Image (cartoon, rainbow, N blue to C red):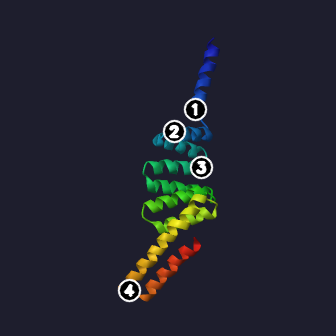
């Protein structure tokens, strides 16, 4: 009986420790689905400790941080996801969303273009609409500044080249 109790105690202690990266990942995913982003981040941290080469773990942790309005931390995680998997189109797309939100539409367009080049349809839609509209607006602003004498001809031409490139790329 003592041996049976001892074996049972050993089994419980081993089963309560030693979760795998995949188990932590699944637990984190489940928590995120329930909008428990803090709990999800905790589990993704553990998953990443056990498997630091899992791009999806960084991506999903970034998404949870984004939901918690920790935008710069989310961008860092998305960048890490890209470092692990340079073809992670979703990470480029989400960085684009955050850059747009933070007021850097030019940077957002560059990230959306990369995501679109990797096959992300949503990012392709963003580049063909918002980025072109942004570039057209910036060209008009540059023209107004040139007409007012605020920009030199050289500065104006430089801006026109920059924003026409955005239009042509998208």
Tell me the quarter of the picture where residue 17 sits.
Answer: top right
Residue at the extreme bottom of the image, as rendered:
153
Q: Residue 152 location, x and y as percent? A: 40, 87
Residue ID for mark 1: 17
Estimate the spatial distance between the alpha carbons at disc 2 and disc 4, rounded to whole Å: 56 Å
Q: Residue 142 location, x and y as percent? A: 42, 80
Q: Residue 56 location, x and y as percent? A: 59, 49
Front residue (pair 11, 101)? 101
Q: Are marks 3 and 2 in contact (CB under 8 Å)?
A: no
**Helix, strand or loop at disc 4?**
helix
Q: Earlier in the sequence, mark 3 or mark 1?
A: 1
**Helix, strand or loop at disc 1?**
loop
Tell me the quarter of the picture where residue 91 sits.
Answer: bottom right
**Helix, strand or loop at disc 2?**
helix
In the drawing, what numbered circle is on residue 147?
4
Q: Earlier in the sequence, mark 3 or mark 2?
A: 2
In the drawing, what numbered circle is on residue 56?
3
- Dot in front, 1 or 2: 2
Estimate the spatial distance between the alpha carbons at disc 1 and disc 2, rounded to whole Å: 19 Å
Q: Earlier in the sequence, mark 2 or mark 4?
A: 2
Residue 52 is at least partly visible in this image: no
Front residue (pair 136, 58)? 136
Q: Is residue 142 above or below residue 12?
A: below
- Dot in front, 4 or 3: 4
The quadrant the N terminus occupies is top right
In the drawing, what numbered circle is on residue 31?
2
Q: Residue at x 47, y 43 (%)?
A: 37
Q: Residue at x 47, y 66 (%)?
A: 105
Q: Are marks 1 and 4 in contact (CB under 8 Å)?
A: no
Estimate the spatial distance between the alpha carbons at disc 3 and disc 2, rounded to whole Å: 15 Å
In the drawing, what numbered circle is on residue 122?
none
Q: Residues within 10 Å of mark 1 (few under 14, many from 20)?
A: few
């Amino acid at each position: 009986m003592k041996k049976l109790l001892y074996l049972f105690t050993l089994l419980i202690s081993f089963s309560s420790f030693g979760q795998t990266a995949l188990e932590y990942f699944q637990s984190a995913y489940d928590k995120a689905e329930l909008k428990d982003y803090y709990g999800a981040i905790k589990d993704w941290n553990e998953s990443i400790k056990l498997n630091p080469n899992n791009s999806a773990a960084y991506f999903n942790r970034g998404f949870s941080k984004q939901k918690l309005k920790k935008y710069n931390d989310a961008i860092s995680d998305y960048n890490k996801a890209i470092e692990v998997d340079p073809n992670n189109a979703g990470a480029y797309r989400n960085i684009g969303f955050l850059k747009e939100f933070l007021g850097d539409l030019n940077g957002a367009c560059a990230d959306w273009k990369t995501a679109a080049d990797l096959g992300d349809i949503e990012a392709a839609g963003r580049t063909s609409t918002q980025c072109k509209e942004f570039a057209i607006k910036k060209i008009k602003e540059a023209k107004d500044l040139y007409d007012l004498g605020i920009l030199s001809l050289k500065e104006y031409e430089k801006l026109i080249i920059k924003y026409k490139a955005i239009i042509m790329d998208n």
